[in-house]
Amino acid sequence: MPKVSILVPTYNVSQYLDECMQSLIRQTLKDIEIICINDGSTDNSLEILKGYAAKDSRIKIIDKENGGYGIAMNMGLEQATGEYVGILEPDDYVKLNMYETLYNIAKKEDLDFIKADFYRFVHNENGKLILHYHQLSQDLNLYNRVINPYEEPQVFRLIMNTWSGIYKRSFLLENNIKHHETPGASFQDNGFWFKTFCYAKRTYFVNKPFYLNRRDNPNSSVHNKEKVFCMNDEYAYIHKFMEDNPKFLERFMDQYSFRRYHNYINSYHRVGEEYKDMYLERFQQEFKEAFEAGELRQENFTEYEWEGIQVLLENALAFKYFMKYDEKREQYNRIKAKYEDIAGSTSFKLGKSIMAIPCKIKDAIKTK
């Protein structure tokens, strides 16, 4: 049994695949299994994978017709034999000590899953790598200790991703945790993520980044403007899962509603302009139904978020302008935070102190 099986769901990513695979075959943890699921690629992704598999016996390839992310991931999970399972998107890559570090903690603490902070990255027009550090949580008390999500459901507020950690394979199998398999859909990792948090009793979050998540792949689902209701379909799937498990429905409805609201807003911003009004109509209808069912509680949202929900329930067009204001507010907060970072830097303080002397001399001359 390998210590970690890493799943690489692959579809038309030939230009990024070498960087991804190099980060895996050079891992400091050598006892790994790399399962690449080629989901009907029409470029030369499969040939690249075969080239790596010919040189490294740890690499297995599943070659299948295109059927979508969820089906590919579930096929990979079925083939995995590792004690733990990781996920690496083929346009991303990881630090060379990621799986060794996380496995050692997971093994020591007997964890259902462990996750870590991560980077998002793009390349500028000159090809320079631009990294942005992302913390899973702003609450440092949620890091570096064992947490049971049922007892501390605030962990559902952490940044949602399935790839910055590893999962105990027996935990996934015992609870039948799989991805949603709707062909052609996107965001099917949301349901997987939600289920792992519902079932897990021993989780752990590390405040160090190991995973590098690409944001400049134009073919990524986060940039797809035409898959309009995929996120809504995924949350209907999660809701059905909770209906089938009443203890989760009762305990985690607040967390579900919070994630749903924010992911629907993200989807609104993602879809093409020609679909936005149609998307808002469905957004409003679904949240009216949720409000009437008692699934939306004011205490689960900030005052500003709750104001937005009230606007949405009353008038979808007004909510469109509410979100435009929200975008400007976020832009202002980002600029403010950037200025505060600069103002707090040593170089800024030094420059300010140096400039203070000529300014005082200048003021003294003026007074004379």
Image: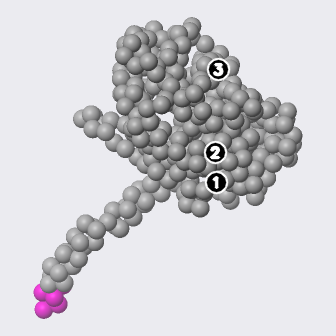
* Element at label 2: loop
Magenta stretch: includes residue 288: no
Q: Earlier in the sequence, mark 2 or mark 3?
A: 3
Is 213 placed left or right of 171 in the picture? Answer: left
Of residues 368 and 114, the one drawn nearer to the viewer in this rendering: 114
The type of residue carrying mark 1 is Val
Tell me the crowding category of disc 2: few under 14, some 14 to 19, or many 20 or more residues within 10 angstroms, Cα based: many
In this picture, which residue range is highlighted in magenta? Answer: 363-368
Is 97 placed left or right of 236 in the picture? Answer: left
Q: Quadrant of residue 335?
A: bottom left
The type of residue carrying mark 3 is Glu
The residue to which callout 1 is attached is 146
The type of residue carrying mark 2 is Leu
Give the number of the disc on residue 78.
Answer: 3
Tell me the crowding category of disc 3: few under 14, some 14 to 19, or many 20 or more residues within 10 angstroms, Cα based: few
The alpha-carbon separation of the residues under discs 2 and 3 comes to: 21 Å
Q: Position of residue 38 (x, y in %)?
A: 51, 14
The alpha-carbon separation of the residues under discs 2 and 1 comes to: 8 Å
Q: Position of residue 235 (x, y in %)?
A: 72, 33
Of residues 10 and 128, the one drawn nearer to the viewer in this rendering: 10
Question: Quarter holding the C terminus?
Answer: bottom left
Q: Is residue 72 visible?
A: yes
Q: Hey, which residue is sitting farthest bottom in the picture?
A: 368
Who's the residue at 71% across and 43% down the image? 200
The residue to which callout 2 is attached is 111
